[in-house]
Image: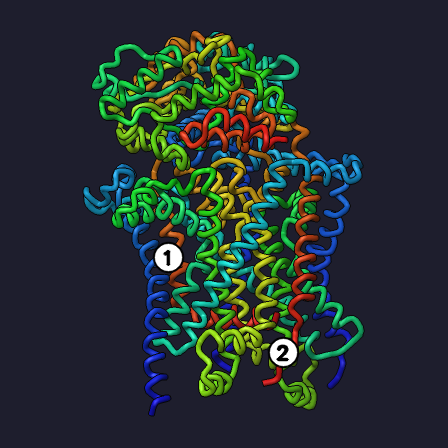
Amino acid sequence: MKVKRQFFLFTAVLLMLSVLPVFSTGQQGADDVDAKNLVYWSMWNETETQAMVLKDAIKEFENENPGVKVDIQWNGREIRKTLQPALDAGTQIDMWDEGVELLTRSWQDYAVNLDPYFEKSYPSTNGKAFKETIIGSLQDLASDLSTDGSIYAVPYQPFVVVSFYNRDHFDKAGITKTPETWAEFLETCDKLQAAGFTPVTIDDAYMDLPLGMHLNRVYGDSNKVVELVKDRSGKLWDDPKVLQAAKDFEALAPYMSPQTEGNKWPAGQQEVATDQVSIYITNGTWLPNEVMGTTGPDFRWGQFPYPAATNSASVTGGIYGAQGFSINNKCAYPDEAFALIAHLTTGKWDKELSAKTYGAPMDTSMPWPVQIEECESVFASLDTYIPWSGGLAEDSDAFPIIVAEFTSLISGKITAEQFIGNVKAKLK
Amino acid sequence: MKRDKTMMITFVTPALITFALVFIYPTIRTIFMSFFYVQAVTDSLGKWNFVGIDNYIKLFSSQMFVQSLKNIFNIWFWGGIGVFAVALLLSIILTSGVKGKGFFRAAIYLPNVISAVAMATMWIHFVFSSKYGLLHNVFDFLGWENMAAVQWTSPTNQFASMTVAYCFGMVGYYVLIFMAGIEKIPRDFYEAAKLEGAHIFQQFRHITMPLMRAVMRSSIVMWSVSSIVFFIWSMMFSTLDPQVGTVTPMVYMYALVFGRSIVPSDPTLLNAGAGAAVGVIMTLIVLVVFGIVNVTIRDKKIQY
Amino acid sequence: MNILKNRFNKQTITRLPGYTVLNLWVIFTAVLVTWIILASLSTTREIFTSTMLQTGFHFENYPKALFAHNIASYFLNSVIYTFLSGIGIILIAAPCAYILARFSFKGNKFIQNLFVGSLGIPQIMIILPLFFMASTFSLTNSRFLIIILYICLNIPFTVFFLLSFFATIPGSFEEAAAIDGCSPMRTFWIIIFPLAQPGIITVAIFNFIVIWNEFFIALIFANTSDLRPLSVGLYSMIQSMRYIGDWAGMFAAVIVVFVPTFIIYIFLSKKIIAGVTGGALKG
């Protein structure tokens, strides 16, 4: 009986001790009751370089503004699934970040209209209005994506989707000019293969980009791609343009890495990072940063814009954009929130972010990091905005089916005709 | 014995309250919700739009939902056969008098105890890697070039890979159950059969299987209930959003209600009402399976 | 004599393939875990070029995984959730099982069937209203909520499991206690409850493992950095690894999550197996 009594006593003590944290909610309130508490749900994972820089930047802001305390929740990209339900449930979330496209198209109704804030100046803008210090094309993008032409997201970490290549491999294969047409692209792959390299690879996570880009090149209009994806009758898929696009990829298949089919992201990225493959056909400018652990900063990266397709209608469109910050329209301290955002995205911390994350700066006078320097001119020259996935994702039912068939096509497992046939059959 | 009504009520009520709160009320509400269009799962009743069986019609005309049903059926059927066959084999071996039975049984059950997230990671990034993985290296070593080059995680192969990996972990649980069931059968039966000249397979067919009826029946029900909620392995094998080879009803519902990584711009695609309909369909399937199993495998009361 | 010889030959012949199968199965599991451990001591580059461990043992992957990824808080959360829920489940389920086992009354069978029936309800059937209720009371993202959920969700099984244990305890104990003047409720807690200890401990361990590895509920209700338990925490660590390309670190995180469960399993495997077998056979 003594043992049993001790056991119960022990359990009771444990119970009492552990009850203490029970009533804590996930978000710790401010220590100082008078402090203004801002809750920031971040899209970054705590171990990413962006998170480390943002942490330091936010700490500095708190020191400079003693009345403000920021509580950061590092959600990772799961925020895409957890933010909206949390907002609907009334959780206190004052600001969040994600891609500008997502912020504006999906979450505009939760966010503050930022136009008035863009007119003001902040400590880091040197007296100029905020809107004059950051890249204009991104502001235009943000306002274009919204339903009322206002800006709902402060862009930062601009990106553009390009093809990445290993400059050492290109040098060794005697390639002096980056390809601009599909025929040139195939020739480049041929030379790489002759020099003993595996020319191209990609991962499942980005598998939609080449097809999306290609179809946009062919049609010149992303709305046509959306129509194609939503088509269930099969008529639009019979268009010879689509077949030609498929044939382009059939021709590329022999140059793709044998791992392409099974590459679970980021395995393909590692193929390029470990010198085993020369080209990653489509990725965002964040790629060098994501594989920095394997490559080190001395890896000679090159980029070129996605080539023209055979019989392209247009070659100047690109998938570009930025990450962005939004402020909750229920936020109690929007002014402080925007001041924080300005602090993070301009001036000193813009420079820090760019340097430490090998990402593009928002300041138009600063050069882009050497790892993505060839992207700077690409970004500047883009005149048509293509949404992520080129419009393929507009039908969430057809999307995975098309991508699965496309994977078989680009790995050489099926022919172009089979690709079209399979897609038509499965989407009926 | 004294029947203390107060005690009876005090003791039973908390359990009943939690049950009503977490099972009865939500089940009824989910069934109700499945007949409405509900954009956000947190919308109050006022924001619900009655659509009758529209949600159900939309679901069955969604290729990905239908694919998820196909996937779950294949997991249940082929996976079930595989798991039960292997588990029976292992449990027969273990109850035939081998040494180290306890050790083997514990070792075989181990994968079932480890977090599925950890197991799935080990399978995806080690066993199935076509670059440096186990299968690749083994086949390479054996000189089987074709098999060494197989892309286990490709869209065409990943369903089978995922199912095999899942089943490996599940075998252990059924080995435990089958062993307990077999060990209940008196040894005399087997002795008598051996004396009459029956060999292993005949013993199995005429003694083991009939007497394992009840165990089999409850195992099939268990397997059905656990495979219908196939979720974690699916999430692990799908990189961002549900893929053709990995989608299951629960994953489909999660994407339908809570969103995806690559988001279409049309907000009306999020529909909690349809998510509820998925739940109703899944529960109906479980009930049907339960009914079929109970009818086909009659439980004979067995006296030893 | 002939019969004996035949039986001996049959035994050796039939046992050898059996041993082979068993050993293959166990060896596969061992290889799986061992490789992951070795990979976790390597670098990402080496893993991909199949040159593992060429630059020696990289033990630093472990402190990195432990501290950069917040594993300690995930571990603490798992401990809090399993302990508190485990206690809560027993406190509510045991008395209920006792009453259902001991006393016959109208509705007894009905209640028992309700509980058993709920075991077949898939969680997707109840999750949406649960989320709605939680958000209405502003309880989303709170430890309180998830513990309540874990308790409520596991009560039916625990009641079902404990029913037979209480049924086997002879009524003489209650009668003796009544003669001594002990009230029925006190009798239960002081005498009957301890007597059912083997069953209670077994189901408690079973619940422990279920809640420890639970994923779906935690994914929806406890998915912020302060609240994640190990299962969801590991999932978020793996996702985050992808963005920094750190395979070795990911494997280190997997091992760090694997080891506690493994150690607990080694000590408690007999009990766990007994619990699984006992509970399942009653179905």
- Mark 2 — residue? C166
Q: Quadrant of the C terminus of chain B?
A: bottom right
Q: Residue at x 67, y 84 (%)?
A: C182
| Residue A67 image position (x, y, % from top left) | 51, 29
Q: Residue at x 51, y 63 (%)?
A: B84
Is circle 1 on the same chain as circle 2? yes
Q: Please report contact status of discs 1 and 2: CB closer than 8 Å, yes or no.
A: no
Q: Secondary structure at mark 2?
A: helix
Q: Is residue C45 left or right of residue C71?
A: left
| Residue B166 image position (x, y, % from top left) | 47, 53
- Mark 1 — residue? C259
Q: Chain of mark 2?
A: C
- Up the image or down, B184 lies above or below A21; here it is below
Q: Amino acid at mark 2?
A: Phe
Q: Residue furthest left?
A: C55
Q: Secondary structure at mark 1?
A: helix
Q: Residue at x 78, y 71 (%)?
A: C107
